[in-house]
Image (cartoon, coloured by chain):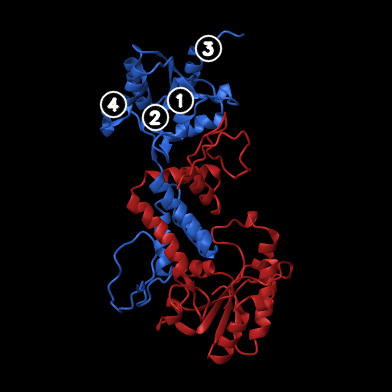
Chain colours: A blue, B red
């Protein structure tokens, strides 16, 4: 594998996203080819621009070989081993995820979220001890995402076939989130109690700086002092 | 490969840097094992904390398999293929780097820098058409780095054996940088002209906000108007 061209062609290289090495004329000679490829690949990651990609790449080149291989291995193995739980569609390396298999979690409560990262966020609170259901997105007709593209059908089956006492809808209050909440709520109400997480002033938030919609929601959701 | 433990032991796991999955009792069940490993590995990268690592890892899981493999491959290949140029010690995938091999670059001028990233920064200016020499660090007695730990010996050989008209020292004005500049300067002065890059007010910089040392340097380095 010869990564570097040595032809003295006066034609410029085709446009590329990063500086690359060329060896003719007075052209830029900044990154050696494998380094340019790595920088290019790293730029596909979210929030990684050319400068961060260069810093990460140069850092990788300085680390010991086994550490670099461990990183590459972790990337490939995570991709190959992690799929979706067949019950709740959370990320899982097993056919059924740990949360669904946990014997001491409350099987009569299902918390419905849009994405696996919402499960992770909720788990970190250590407050919720029931089960989950990951929809895999939100209803968005503009993007061509209807109820059939999400795991709503499977949720309905879970709720209708098992003894579920409560379904908590934990979905962000965006346009798509509201649509999804309404749709799923109507669908499940014949089978069980359906609730929705509270919206209002965030903890530590300043009332003065809260937007009107949040304030209106906070007023609407007011509760008696105990 | 069974990544998840199923023993109902009441003993907690040994301390680890990220949340991991365990399946007993009321313990946290946040990341499935391969995902936890990936997040842990990503946190070794500079500027990547737990939140960024999670975002990157979940992004990687969502990408197509071939794209993920391309990233892992680029990481390993860059590490295995990129070494140092035997002449100037810049990063190179070949025994002698592109800059050293370029026939149309001025071989009589050597720009001396501390690190390969300085070469990249200087090349991006497209102003310099000579050769380079990467020292691989700066003299720092506190850290046990003396001239013998750097590529100073090889620089002296280059300068004494070839027809070098000018050596430009492009080293940051830190304590270690000044020490290194003085040392290398004295070493090479018998053989050739030794210069040093200018220090002063940065372009676009406001005189009012410049620190005293920079201003003093800018005054000291003043030049006749042409």
Q: Residue furthest right?
A: B142
Specify the subunit that label 2 lies on.
A
Instruction: Give the structural element (helix, strand or loop) at label 1.
Output: strand
**Which residue is disc 4 drawn over?**
A147
Disc 3: CA contacts within 10 A as few (<14), some (14-19) or many (>=20): few
Specify the subunit that label 3 lies on.
A
Give x and y (percent) for residue A3: 36, 71
Q: Residue B140 got which mark?
A: none
Give x and y (percent) for residue B125: 47, 68
| Label 2 to label 1: alpha-carbon separation | 8 Å
Q: Residue A131 got which mark?
A: 1
**Circle nearer the viewer, 4 or 1:** 1
Give x and y (percent) for residue A26: 38, 76
Query: Quick one: label 4 or label 2, which is nearer the N terminus?
Result: 2
The answer to whether the residues at label 2 and label 1 have Cβ atoms under 8 Å apart is: yes
**Circle nearer the viewer, 2 or 3:** 2
The answer to whether the residues at label 4 and label 2 have Cβ atoms under 8 Å apart is: no
Q: Are marks 4 and 1 on the same chain?
A: yes
Q: Which residue corresponds to the image point at 63% horizontal and 36% vertical from the top-left? A: B11
Q: Nearer the viewer, residue A219 or B196?
A: A219
Q: Is residue B110 left or right of residue A86?
A: right
Instruction: Give the structural element (helix, strand or loop) at label 2.
Output: loop
The answer to whether the residues at label 4 and label 1 have Cβ atoms under 8 Å apart is: no
Query: Quick one: label 2 or label 3, which is nearer the N terminus?
Result: 2
**Circle nearer the viewer, 3 or 1:** 1
Q: Nearer the viewer, residue B175 or A96?
A: A96
| Label 4 to label 1: alpha-carbon separation | 21 Å
**Which residue is disc 2 drawn over?**
A88
Q: Quadrant of residue A8?
A: bottom left
Q: Quadrant of residue A40?
A: bottom left
């Amino acid at each position: 594998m010869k990564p570097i061209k040595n032809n003295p062609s006066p034609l410029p290289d085709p446009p590329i996203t990063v500086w690359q090495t060329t060896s003719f004329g007075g052209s830029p000679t900044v990154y050696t080819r494998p380094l340019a490829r790595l920088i290019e690949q790293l730029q596909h990651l979210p929030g990684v621009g050319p400068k961060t990609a260069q810093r990460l790449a140069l850092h990788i080149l300085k680390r010991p070989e086994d550490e670099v291989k461990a990183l590459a291995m972790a990337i490939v193995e995570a991709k190959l081993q992690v799929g979706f739980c067949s019950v709740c569609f959370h990320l899982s390396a097993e056919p059924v995820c740990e949360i669904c298999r946990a014997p001491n979690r409350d099987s009569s409560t299902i918390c419905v979220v849009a994405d696996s990262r919402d499960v992770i966020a909720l788990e970190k609170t250590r407050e919720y001890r029931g089960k989950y259901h990951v929809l895999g997105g939100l209803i968005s007709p503009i993007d061509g995402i209807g109820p059939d593209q999400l795991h709503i059908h499977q949720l309905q089956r879970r709720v209708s076939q098992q003894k579920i006492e409560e379904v908590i809808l934990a979905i962000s209050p965006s346009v798509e989130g509201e649509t999804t909440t309404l749709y799923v709520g109507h669908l499940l109400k014949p089978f069980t109690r359906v609730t929705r997480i509270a919206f209002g002033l965030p903890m530590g938030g300043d009332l003065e700086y809260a937007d009107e919609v949040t304030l209106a929601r906070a007023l609407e959701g007011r509760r008696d002092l105990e």
